[in-house]
Image: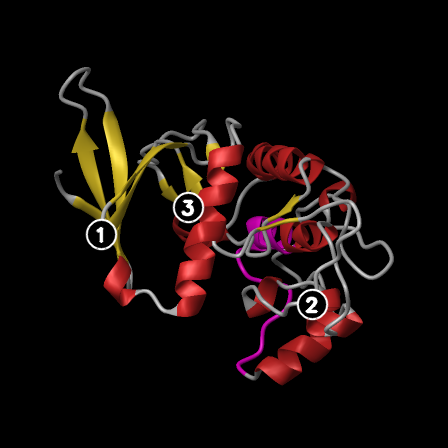
């Protein structure tokens, strides 16, 4: 294995080359001794989901090697980095660029939701570009909080990243796959202006804004964005995006 691509509290991602055919892979090395009960549950969930899906806009898990000390996840290389970093570099996306990105994310979510998989942690940090080009494919990653539902199941656990969670999660209500669409609406907003619709250093104040759906389109950041490209709201959440 070669250079380190990323590192976390219990896992390191390294670049590797298949000696037989020269293909490049990202190897996620998970040290089992560093896993707590919640980490272990999240890892099993991620592996189960990734082994069950295959879509151009979802990071591909090729194979797994399980040893006593470590778990090795052989995954496709996403050399283009996070959507978060692209937004930071660009400041904001044009409508055409945003539409291209949102359609790819929506395609991945549609695929998951058709299979009763809810991601529950959709955010720019968990969306990776396949390469550095402007036309690069965007891929959904990090399924640690994902859940497979059956036709009768609704979820109740509070989880996700504060600025992206849907009102149902904040309210501790039952919820399903639609919470991902709320998060997609938040991402759409960020793409157009470079900052989130809901922000507060105090999580309780942040959650109050989310519950009420309090957001604006401040000038000058939204002056050149068309009305049809703006995030729409239906019922208790951003479940539809007009332009995607």
Distance (Cα) linking label 2 and label 1: 37 Å
Q: Which residue is mark 2?
A: 169
Going from N to C along the chain, the mark reached first, 1 or 3, is: 1
Between marks 1 and 3, how big is the CA–CA gap?
38 Å
Residue at the image point whose x is 69% and y is 67% from the top: 169
Against 103, is 8 above or below? below
Q: Which residue is mark 3?
A: 86
Q: Is residue 187 visible?
A: yes
212 up-or-down from 93: above or below: below
Residue that numbered label 1 is attached to: 68
Residue 167 position, x and y percent, is 74, 67
Q: Identify the residue at image location x=73%, y=54%.
A: 176
Looking at the image, the residue that sits furthest to the right is 235
108 lies left or right of 175? left
Q: Are marks 1 and 3 in contact (CB under 8 Å)?
A: no
Position of 155 with respect to 54 (left or right) is right
């Amino acid at each position: 294995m070669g250079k380190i691509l990323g590192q976390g509290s219990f896992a390191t991602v390294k670049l590797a080359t298949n000696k037989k055919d020269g293909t490049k892979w990202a190897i996620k090395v998970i040290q089992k001794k560093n896993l707590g009960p919640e980490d272990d549950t999240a890892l099993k969930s991620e592996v189960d989901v990734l082994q069950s899906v295959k879509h151009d806009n979802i990071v591909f898990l090729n194979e797994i090697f399980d040893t006593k000390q470590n778990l090795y996840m052989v995954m496709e290389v996403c050399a283009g980095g996070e959507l978060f970093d692209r937004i930071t570099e660009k400041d904001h996306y044009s409508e055409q660029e945003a539409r291209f990105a949102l359609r790819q994310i929506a395609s991945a979510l549609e695929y998951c939701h058709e299979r009763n998989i809810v991601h529950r942690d959709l955010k720019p940090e968990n969306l990776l570009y396949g390469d550095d080009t402007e036309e690069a494919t965007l891929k959904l990653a990090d399924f640690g909080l994902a859940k497979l539902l059956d036709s009768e199941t609704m979820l109740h656990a509070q989880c996700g990243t504060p600025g992206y969670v849907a009102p149902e999660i904040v309210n501790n209500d039952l919820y399903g796959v639609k919470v991902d669409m709320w998060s997609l609406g938040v991402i759409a907003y960020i793409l157009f202006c470079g900052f989130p619709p809901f922000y507060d250093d105090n999580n309780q104040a942040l959650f109050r804004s989310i519950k009420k759906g309090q957001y604006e389109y401040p000038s000058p950041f939204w002056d050149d964005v068309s009305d049809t490209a703006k995030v729409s709201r239906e019922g208790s959440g951003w479940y539809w995006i007009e332009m995607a």
